[in-house]
Amino acid sequence: MQLSSTLAWLVDAAAEAPAPERFLADLGQRLIADGVPLAGGALALAAPHPLIARRSWLWRADSGEVTEALGFMPGGLATSAAPSPPGEAGRRWLAGLAGGRVHEDAVPPRPNGPMLAWIGPRPFTAEEAGRLSQAARFAAAPLAALTARATLTAALEAYLGRRSAARVLAGPLRRGVGETIQAALLFADLRGFTALSESNPPSEVISALDAWFDRIALAVQAFGGEVLKFMGDGVLAIFPVAGSTPRSACRAALSAVAAARAGMAHLDEARQQKGLAPLPFGVALHLGEILWGNIGAADRLDFTAIGHAVNLVSRLEGLCRPLDKAVLISGAFAAETTSPLIPLGTHALRGITSPCAVFTAPED
């Protein structure tokens, strides 16, 4: 049987599409070239993500533009409602785009599988609808490959962060594979976590930890940083230096700390209204070189950062309690920022050979 150019592309090359949005746009353009009148199309995929239940891509034939719509999990940041049924966002968008009737196919037909939907400038004929359904059947294999790739990427990003996930996907799974980079480092943890754990049921402890991690991690991500590790009640994050000057990375790290402090102040106020104790914390900032890559056993790896700078920032955070400061900043970091800082003298850090000049940020 002689396949049309669109079906041949679906068999031979579509699985190599770099992303679902590119797949949708290419498929729509090929169907138009084959004589199927289209005004737009939509593709919906289930998303293995802590917050997102489903992702939909919406394509306009007149401009070639593709936009993305997200369906959030119940209780997610954007909504507390149940996620829309498969393809619902795309179906509504298509219905408002043109006067035709939406043609929709499950690929393959199952409740949570990919959904392809199309609309034309007029209702599709029976022959055109049949060609769209045939294209959907041939699309099953490449969409399975795209879904598997998206699932792997989403899972790695959820556990490692976006930058680290990209490095893992791009590099071989071997020990010693990594690179030395310069970064502003942030190390933070809660104070009194042991007492909190011993005096409260596990569910309340986990709820407090999640609230703390929300404030610190989302602040880090909002200013371009990446959380490398959650360690008990602690967080290690990096702001990689781009270009020749670390000033922007340090500025971003300071902004993240300010945002986290504001978020924790609101959280403590809400907790006190419920009769719960506040959650005091300490944060340290440092600038230095780290080895960013794979370490571990022969067959069990961890992607992380190690080096003198990591040791120093963790030891510096340990001074927050004795110095009674929420934020401590190393001399190396302070030298690369124009923000007003308060000097606290030079202090010895446990396990660090040279004393460290220490600064703090103003309270306001």
Image (cartoon, rainbow, N blue to C red):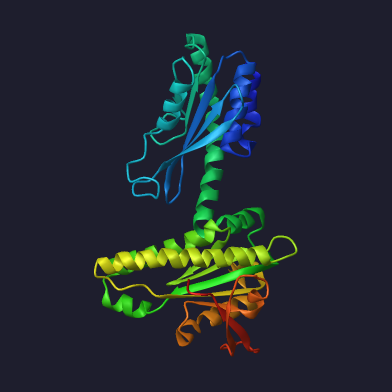
Image height check: is 22 above or below 104? below
* Residue most extreme to the right: 244
Front residue (pair 125, 15): 125
Residue 266 percent across, percent down from the top left: 37, 64
Residue sitting at 45 percent across and 68 percent down?
261
Front residue (pair 79, 245): 245
Residue sitting at 44 percent across and 21 percent down?
95
Is residue 7 at least partly visible in the picture? no
Image height check: is 57 above or below 338? above
Front residue (pair 194, 116): 194
Q: Quadrant of residue 226?
A: bottom right
Quarter of the image with the N terminus is top right
Image height check: is 299 above or below 346? above
* Residue most extreme to the left: 275
Residue 348 percent across, percent down from the top left: 59, 90
Residue sitting at 32 percent across and 67 percent down?
269
Residue 53 percent across, percent down from the top left: 41, 43
Image height check: is 280 above or below 121? below
Q: Is residue 274 left or right of residue 9?
A: left
Is residue 14 at least partly visible in the picture? yes
Numbered circles on residues, count: 0
Residue 244 percent across, percent down from the top left: 75, 64
